């Protein structure tokens, strides 16, 4: 029996509509942005400058929750860690994010764009939990095996350019 | 005056990452050993290479001072010139495995090939850095404070394999001449 992509897309559209309800009710306080920075050469090399920054704000806003305070680490920080006086690389679960369908959703490639020596990809989380302007994370795990949703696990990474 | 190791750190990065001596201003021998600017790049945020995003890793350099001591010199605290021996690790990172997009290729390197030969690249670069960094004409400048008296490699350049990356650590022994009248805490 052949795969029924049409049915899957229809279910994804329904799932996407349902996932907009919390946003409408105002209970999605944390926004999620996929940020891709392109540089004129290898990141950090002498004379290399930032060429462009491309932001993709996920719509609808997915659920974000802290799953682990994380380990102490070089790139730790943020409001919670500052209050405890330790640099902690917190981990957050982002999702469910609806898989792509005609008219919406996201492919794995859109959520985790291909990187490169002159490109830097981070996930920007903004909201009450995070410092002003948001904090940057990197994807440490992505599960796109389910038919209607993608889940991301992100950990705090180097901030800024 | 700034902190004790500010000048040393700047000098090392100038030699390894910024092409110090390439223009011939330090002599022909130094020019021969100088490293072209951009061949190596400092680790962003001075981050440990083990935790660094892979886009910044290939030929990323981190200067990591390990210790400082008086030995093996007799130490007269009343002398105006104080000699200290600094041990500093120079870490260089390389991506390895099926990640050609993150390879910072130089010269005739091909990313599709060298992504599988990270160890050979690391050993080769370790020698390139060693021959540049240990040449007095490259690191000495009479106006320095503290003065860098001598730099030599302490032991072997060793590789650590972390799966997606190889880190080459070379420990250098650096003799510094401090001024007894400078506090180095500004």
Image: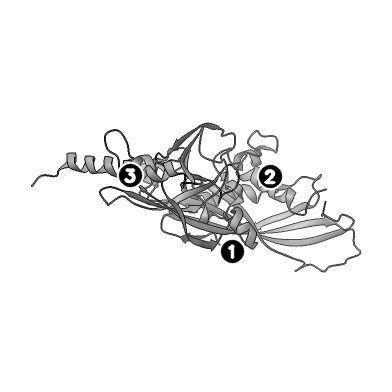
Q: Is residue B32 above or below residue B12?
A: above
Q: Secondary structure at mark 3?
A: helix
Q: Which residue is under mark 3?
A: A18
**Which colouring convention does the figure follow?**
one colour
Q: Are marks 1 and 3 on the same chain?
A: no
x, y percent for residue B16: 61, 45
x, y percent for residue B115: 39, 47
Residue B153 in sight from this viewpoint: no
Q: Which residue is under mark 2?
A: B138
Q: CA distance from mark 1 to mark 2?
A: 21 Å
Q: Secondary structure at mark 2?
A: helix
Label 1: chain?
Answer: B
Q: Mark 1: few, some, or many residues within 10 Å (few <14, many ≥20)?
A: few
Q: Residue B150 lies in what quarter of the image?
A: bottom right
Q: Kindly indicate whether the residue at mark 2 contacts the one at mark 1 (C-beta within 8 angstroms).
A: no
Q: Residue furthest front?
A: A25
Q: Mark 3: few, some, or many residues within 10 Å (few <14, many ≥20)?
A: few
Q: CA distance from mark 3 to mark 2?
A: 66 Å
Q: Residue furthest right?
A: B78
Q: Are marks 3 and 2 on the same chain?
A: no
Residue A19 in sight from this viewpoint: yes
Q: Which residue is under mark 1?
A: B155
Query: Which of label 1 and label 3 is nearer to you?
Result: 3
The earlier-in-sequence mark between 1 and 2 is 2
x, y percent for residue A139: 43, 50
- The residue drawn where x is 75% and y is 68% is B71
x, y percent for residue A95: 38, 50
Q: Which mark is residue A119?
A: none
Label 3: chain?
Answer: A
């Amino acid at each position: 029996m052949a795969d029924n992509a049409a049915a899957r897309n229809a279910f994804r559209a329904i799932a996407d509509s349902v996932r907009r309800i919390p946003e409408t009710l105002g209970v999605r306080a944390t926004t999620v942005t996929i940020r891709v920075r392109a540089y004129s050469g290898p990141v950090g090399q002498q004379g290399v400058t930032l060429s462009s920054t491309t932001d993709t704000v996920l719509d609808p806003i997915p659920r974000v929750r802290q799953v682990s305070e994380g380990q102490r680490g070089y790139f730790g920080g943020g409001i919670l860690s500052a209050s405890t006086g330790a640099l902690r690389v917190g981990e957050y679960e982002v999702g469910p994010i609806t898989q792509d369908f005609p008219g919406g959703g996201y492919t794995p490639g859109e959520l985790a764009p291909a990187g490169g020596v002159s490109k830097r990809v981070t996930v920007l989380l903004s909201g009450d939990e995070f410092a002003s302007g948001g904090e940057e994370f990197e994807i440490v795990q992505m599960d796109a095996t389910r038919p209607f949703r993608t889940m991301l696990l992100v950990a705090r990474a180097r901030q800024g350019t | 005056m700034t902190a004790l190791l500010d000048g040393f750190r700047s000098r090392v990065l100038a030699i390894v990452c910024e092409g110090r001596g390439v223009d011939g201003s330090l002599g022909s021998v130094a020019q021969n050993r100088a490293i072209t600017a951009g061949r190596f790049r400092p680790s962003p945020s001075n981050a440990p290479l083990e935790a660094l995003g892979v886009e910044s890793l290939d030929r990323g350099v981190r200067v990591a001072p390990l210790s400082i001591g008086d030995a093996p010199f007799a130490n007269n605290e009343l002398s105006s010139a104080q000699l200290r021996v600094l041990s500093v690790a120079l870490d260089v990172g390389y991506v390895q495995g099926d990640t050609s997009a993150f390879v910072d290729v130089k010269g005739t390197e091909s990313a599709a090939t060298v992504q599988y030969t990270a160890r050979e690249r690391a050993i080769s670069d370790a020698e390139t850095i060693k021959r540049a960094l240990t040449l007095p004409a490259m690191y000495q400048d009479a106006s320095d404070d503290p003065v860098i008296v001598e730099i030599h490699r302490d032991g072997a350049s060793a590789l650590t394999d972390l799966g997606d990356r190889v880190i080459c650590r070379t420990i250098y022994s650096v003799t510094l001449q401090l001024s007894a009248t400078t506090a180095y805490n500004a």
